[in-house]
Image: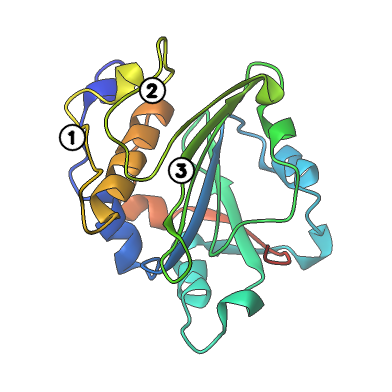
């Protein structure tokens, strides 16, 4: 774990997501819990709609250009590694997310809607929201004193304020998440078998 805290992935993280259809819209929530049934219950997902699929399979449906974004109503839930799980959808969920970080748990959230606001902040929550921090789009490299992110941004560009595209910062956000969770996105990540649930988009 110590090595990955300052490590770099072999592949550009944003490019990998874009290659699987998440160029224009993506929402990912990494949760420091390994019980996906518990996560589904906390998100109040309808167990009757559950079907099993790899993220690669479901990403194709999520990215289908023939379906309007506001009609895409599925999310994928699966294991990220032995300690973390991840929820992926095109546009997020209608559910209270802070309970997922109750106790000593943590959550990390990354999303973008390129046709609306572009990249949204990288959100970190712990202890049910008692500990919260975010890195804003157009990040200028500043972090507050004792930032939870400080040890995970080593070697990354620290000023994106003048970038014409938010793609480099989106990749940096994903690198930070990979360092904090102990796993970067790779092609094997998309082959993970998880559960798909119907869920109204936000």
Closer to the N terminus: mark 3 or mark 1? 3
Query: Circles 3 and 2: CB distance less than 8 Å?
Result: no
Q: Which mark is residue 121?
A: 3
Tell me which residue sits at (27%, 34%) in the image: 140
Is residue 110 something one can see in this rendering? Answer: yes
Q: What is the distance, in whole Å, between disc 1 and disc 2 at their CAs?
A: 14 Å
Position of residue 159 relative to residue 117, above or below, is above
Closer to the N terminus: mark 3 or mark 2? 3
Q: Position of residue 35 (x, y in %)?
A: 67, 35
Spot the residue most to the front.
Answer: 162
Relative side of 196 to 14, left or right: right
Tell me which residue sits at (25%, 43%) in the image: 161
Q: Which mark is residue 157?
A: 1
- Quarter residue 49 falls in: bottom right
Using the image as rendered, state which of residue 22 and residue 119 is in the foreground. 119
Q: Position of residue 71 (x, y in %)?
A: 65, 79
* Helix, strand or loop under label 2: loop
Position of residue 176 relative to residue 22, above or below, is above
Tell me which residue sits at (38%, 71%) in the image: 21
Q: Position of residue 126 (x, y in %)?
A: 61, 22
Q: Residues within 10 Å of mark 1 (few under 14, many from 20)?
A: few
Spot the residue most to the top.
Answer: 146
Protein image colouring: rainbow
- Quarter residue 167 falls in: bottom left
Relative side of 49 to 125, left or right: right
Q: Quadrant of the N terminus?
A: top left
Query: Circles 1 and 2: CB distance less than 8 Å?
Result: no
Tell me which residue sits at (56%, 85%) in the image: 67
Q: Residues within 10 Å of mark 2 (few under 14, many from 20)?
A: some
Q: Which residue position is annotated with label 2?
A: 149
Q: Position of residue 146 (x, y in %)?
A: 42, 10
Relative side of 95 to 129, left or right: right
């Amino acid at each position: 774990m110590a090595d990955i805290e300052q490590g770099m992935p072999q592949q550009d993280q944003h490019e990998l997501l874009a290659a699987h259809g998440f160029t224009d819209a993506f929402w990912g929530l990494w949760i420091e819990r390994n019980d996906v049934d518990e996560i589904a219950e906390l998100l109040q997902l309808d167990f009757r709609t559950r079907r099993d699929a790899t993220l690669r399979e479901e990403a194709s449906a999520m990215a289908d250009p023939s379906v309007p974004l506001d009609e895409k109503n599925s999310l994928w839930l699966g294991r990220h590694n032995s300690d973390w799980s991840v929820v992926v959808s095109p546009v997020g969920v209608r559910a209270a997310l802070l309970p997922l970080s109750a106790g000593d748990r943590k959550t990390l959230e990354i999303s973008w809607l390129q046709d609306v606001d572009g990249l949204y902040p990288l959100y970190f929550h712990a202890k049910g929201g008692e500990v919260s921090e975010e890195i804003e789009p157009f990040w200028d490299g500043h972090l507050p004193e004792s930032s939870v992110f400080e040890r995970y941004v080593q070697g990354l560009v620290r000023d994106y304020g003048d970038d014409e595209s938010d793609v480099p910062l989106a990749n940096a956000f994903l690198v930070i998440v990979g360092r904090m969770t102990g796993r970067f996105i790779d092609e094997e990540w998309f082959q993970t078998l998880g559960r798909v649930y119907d869920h109204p988009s936000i």
